[in-house]
Image: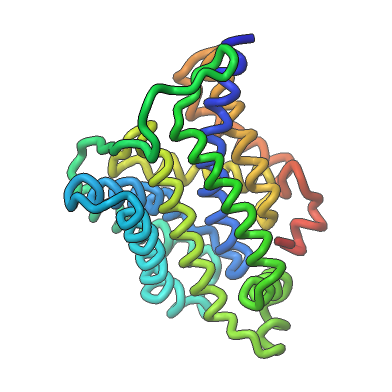
C-alpha cells in the first residue's frame, strides 16, 4: 500500500505536466484542426529559458517566470505568423502538421546550439525537506504543480465561458466558417490559440525542470506523451485531455514501479496505437461529440 500511494502521487505529478502539454494540442486543434507536433519543444524552451533567466542572468523567480512564459508565447506566435498563417487557408492540414514538425526540428537545433547537450535544473519554487503524506514522500514542488493545474483549469473555465475572446474561440471550434460570417476574426483566434498553447507548454517546462532536469532533446518524447493524453481523453475536449494526462501519468508510474522502468515510455506509444485503432474519439467522449469538437 505504501508503494502504491507513492507511485500514485508520482503519476499524478507527471500526469499534470502531460495534461498541460495536451491542452496546448487541444487549443490549437480546436481553432485550426492542426496538430502542433512542436509542442514538446516549447516545454523544453520553458525549462531551459527559466534556467537561463534564473541561473545565468540572476533574475528573481517572478521576473524569470514571466519572461519565460513571454518567450514561449512569443516563439509560438512567431511560429504561427511565419509558418502557419501563410499556408492556413491554402494548404492541406497534413502539410501544416509537417510544417510543425519542421519547426520543431529547427527549434531543437537552436536549443542545442544555445544550451549544448548538458542537462539543466534550477531550485524549486519552495525549498526544504519533502512532505510526508502517510507513508509517501512528496516534494514541495509537486504542490506547486497541482496549484498551477487548478489555476489553469479555473482560467480555462472563466476564459471560455465568461470572456468575449474565449466565446469567439469556442465559436471557431464549432464552425470556423459560420464564426467568420458572424464577424469574428478567425485569424486572430488562431494567433491567440498559438500564444496560449506556447504559454501552457512553457509553464509545463518551468514546473517539471526542478524535479527531472531538462535537456535540449526531450521534446519529441514530451510531444508523444502530450499527444497521447489528448487522444486518450478525447482530442477537442479540455476536460477529457486533462483526465487523459492524469490517467497516462498514473499508468506510467504504476507500470514503471511494479513491472519495469524500461516500459515507462513504451506504454504511451502502446496506448496511442490502441486508441487510434479502436477508439480515436477518446475514452471520455463519443464519436459524435468528437465530431463537434466541443470545448
**Residue 22: x %, y % from top left:** 56, 49
Residue shown at 45% from the left, 27% from the top: 139
Q: In the rendered view of the protein, which quadrant contains the C terminus?
A: bottom right
**Residue 129: x %, y % from top left:** 39, 22
Whether residue 102 is visible:
no
Residue shown at 28% from the left, 37% from the top: 121
Q: State the image quarter where residue 199 is shown.
A: bottom left
Q: State the image quarter where residue 93 is shown.
A: bottom right
**Residue 169: x %, y % from top left:** 64, 72
Whether residue 62 is visible:
yes
Q: Nearer the viewer, residue 74 or 36?
A: 74
Residue shown at 22% from the left, 48% from the top: 112
Q: Residue furthest top?
A: 1
Above/below status of 88 relative to 253? below
Above/below status of 258 relative to 205? above
Q: Nearer the viewer, residue 242 or 269?
A: 242
Above/below status of 258 relative to 282? above
Q: State the image quarter where residue 243 is shown.
A: top right
Residue shown at 68% from the left, 44% from the top: 233
Here the colouring is rainbow
**Residue 287: x %, y % from top left:** 79, 53
Left or right for 2, reference 65: right
Q: How many marks?
A: 0
Q: In the rendered view of the protein, which quadrant contains the N terminus?
A: top right
Amino acid at each position: 500500500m505504501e508503494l502504491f500511494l507513492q507511485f500514485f502521487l508520482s503519476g499524478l505529478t507527471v500526469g499534470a505536466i502531460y495534461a498541460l502539454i495536451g491542452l496546448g494540442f487541444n487549443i490549437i486543434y480546436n481553432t485550426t484542426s492542426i496538430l502542433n507536433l512542436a509542442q514538446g519543444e516549447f516545454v523544453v524552451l520553458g525549462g531551459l529559458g527559466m534556467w537561463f533567466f534564473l541561473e545565468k542572468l540572476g533574475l528573481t523567480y517572478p521576473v524569470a517566470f514571466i519572461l519565460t512564459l513571454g518567450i514561449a508565447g512569443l516563439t509560438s506566435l512567431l511560429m504561427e505568423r511565419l509558418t502557419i498563417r501563410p499556408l492556413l487557408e491554402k494548404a492541406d492540414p497534413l502539410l501544416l502538421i509537417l510544417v510543425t514538425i519542421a519547426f520543431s526540428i529547427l527549434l531543437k537545433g537552436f536549443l542545442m546550439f544555445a544550451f549544448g547537450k548538458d542537462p539543466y535544473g534550477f531550485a524549486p519554487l519552495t525549498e526544504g525537506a519533502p512532505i510526508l503524506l502517510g507513508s509517501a514522500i512528496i516534494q514541495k514542488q509537486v504542490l506547486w504543480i497541482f496549484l498551477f493545474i487548478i489555476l489553469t483549469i479555473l482560467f480555462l473555465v472563466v476564459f471560455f465561458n465568461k470572456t468575449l475572446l474565449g466565446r469567439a474561440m469556442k465559436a471557431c471550434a464549432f464552425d470556423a466558417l459560420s464564426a467568420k460570417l458572424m464577424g469574428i476574426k478567425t485569424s486572430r483566434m488562431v494567433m491567440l490559440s498559438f500564444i496560449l498553447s506556447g504559454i501552457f507548454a512553457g509553464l509545463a517546462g518551468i514546473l517539471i525542470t526542478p524535479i527531472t532536469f531538462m535537456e535540449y532533446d526531450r521534446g519529441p518524447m514530451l510531444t508523444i506523451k502530450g499527444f497521447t493524453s489528448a487522444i486518450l481523453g478525447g482530442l477537442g475536449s479540455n476536460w477529457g485531455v486533462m483526465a487523459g494526462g492524469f490517467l497516462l501519468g498514473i499508468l506510467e508510474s504504476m507500470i514503471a514501479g511494479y513491472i519495469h522502468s524500461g516500459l515507462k515510455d513504451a506504454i504511451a506509444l502502446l496506448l496511442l496505437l490502441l486508441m487510434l485503432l479502436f477508439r480515436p474519439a477518446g475514452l471520455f467522449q463519443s464519436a459524435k461529440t468528437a465530431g463537434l469538437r466541443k470545448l
